[in-house]
Image: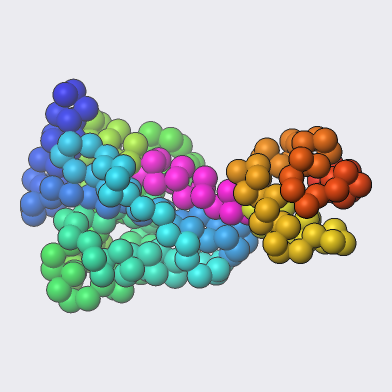
């Protein structure tokens, strides 16, 4: 109940400060590794709190460009979404890029707010920028309670995007390592992955455990384990 009251207070303050009704927020963040394994997360929040079932993670085109990735994510999401506000993890540049990419109807309907750390990147000293299109971008402030809620939503989006990106990167690294071993093709690689259910258990497996996989000889299991050990 306390959690719900906090989010009800957040929506009330957002509506008052932005001078428009805010009942639903979608927060977006991007994670990638030098442009590869690019993932974008969208955390959905209502006056009841974060809606985990409605939140999503998207695999995006590989590119070392956070602006373009945010635009891709926002446009893809807005094709089906009926949100009242987009919360962007970034500064004025990201805020401008996303807003300009929206259709004229979306610009009128959806408020776009950016949350960014200060120049020293001090946690708890976030700054907020609002783009009341077609009027200029302006900085706005909220109560400490609302700031904590917005920061928590931002953190959830960030953590989810990073988690998916790291999982994809680990899987890609494992795939490259195993496929370099003579006799390990795509079918055997998939069989190994399915048997252990993830990349981390494979890396921690002994040769004896690997040899239990149908179609993997003891000699091949030893070779696989040695390759993973020196990766």
Q: Which residues are magenta?
A: 154-170
Looking at the rendered structure, the number of numbered marks drawn on it comes to 0
**Is any part of residue 28 visible from this angle?**
yes
- Where is residue 167 shown, x and y percent of the image? 58, 48
Say which residue appears at 8% left-offset and 45% top-offset: 16
Say which residue appears at 78% left-offset and 55% top-offset: 178
Compared with 226, 82 (above or below) is: below
- Where is residue 152 shown, x and y percent of the image? 34, 36
Q: Is residue 190 left or right of residue 40?
A: right
Compared with 67, 10 (above or below) is: above
Q: Is residue 43 left or right of residue 184?
A: left
Q: Quadrant of residue 70?
A: bottom left
Compared with 157, 109 (above or below) is: below
**Residue placed farthest to the bottom in the image?**
104
Q: Is residue 77 left or right of residue 108?
A: right
Say which residue appears at 55% left-offset and 69% top-offset: 63
Colour scheme in use: rainbow
Closest to the observer: 58 or 149? 58
Does 106 lie within the magenta span? no
**Residue placed farthest to the top in the image?**
2
The chief SS type of the magenta part is helix
**Is any part of residue 93 visible from this angle?**
no
- Where is residue 42 shown, x and y percent of the image? 35, 53
- Where is residue 116 shown, x and y percent of the image? 38, 48
**Residue placed farthest to the front in the image?**
214
Q: Is residue 119 left or right of residue 169?
A: left
Figure quadrant of the N terminus = top left
Does 161 lie within the magenta span? yes
Closest to the observer: 80 or 148? 80
């Amino acid at each position: 109940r306390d959690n719900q009251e906090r989010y009800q207070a957040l929506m009330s303050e957002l509506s008052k400060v932005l001078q428009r009704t805010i009942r639903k927020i979608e927060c977006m963040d991007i994670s990638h590794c030098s442009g590869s394994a690019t993932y974008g997360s969208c955390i959905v929040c209502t006056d009841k709190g974060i809606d985990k079932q409605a939140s999503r993670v998207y695999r995006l085109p590989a590119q070392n460009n956070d602006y373009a990735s945010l635009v891709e994510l926002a446009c893809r999401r807005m094709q089906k979404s009926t949100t009242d506000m987009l919360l962007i993890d970034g500064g004025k540049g990201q805020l401008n890029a996303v807003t300009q990419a929206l259709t004229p109807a979306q610009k009128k309907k959806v408020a776009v707010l950016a949350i960014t750390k200060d120049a020293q990147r001090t946690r708890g000293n976030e700054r907020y920028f609002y783009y009341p299109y077609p009027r200029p971008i302006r900085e706005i402030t909220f109560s400490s309670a609302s700031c904590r809620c917005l920061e928590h939503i931002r953190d959830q989006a960030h953590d989810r995007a990073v988690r998916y990106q790291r999982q994809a990167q680990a899987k890609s690294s494992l795939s490259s390592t195993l496929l370099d071993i003579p006799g390990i093709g795509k079918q055997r690689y998939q069989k190994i992955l399915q048997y252990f259910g993830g990349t981390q258990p494979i890396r921690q497996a002994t040769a004896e455990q690997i040899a239990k996989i149908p179609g993997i000889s003891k000699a091949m299991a030893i070779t696989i384990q040695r390759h993973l050990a020196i990766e």
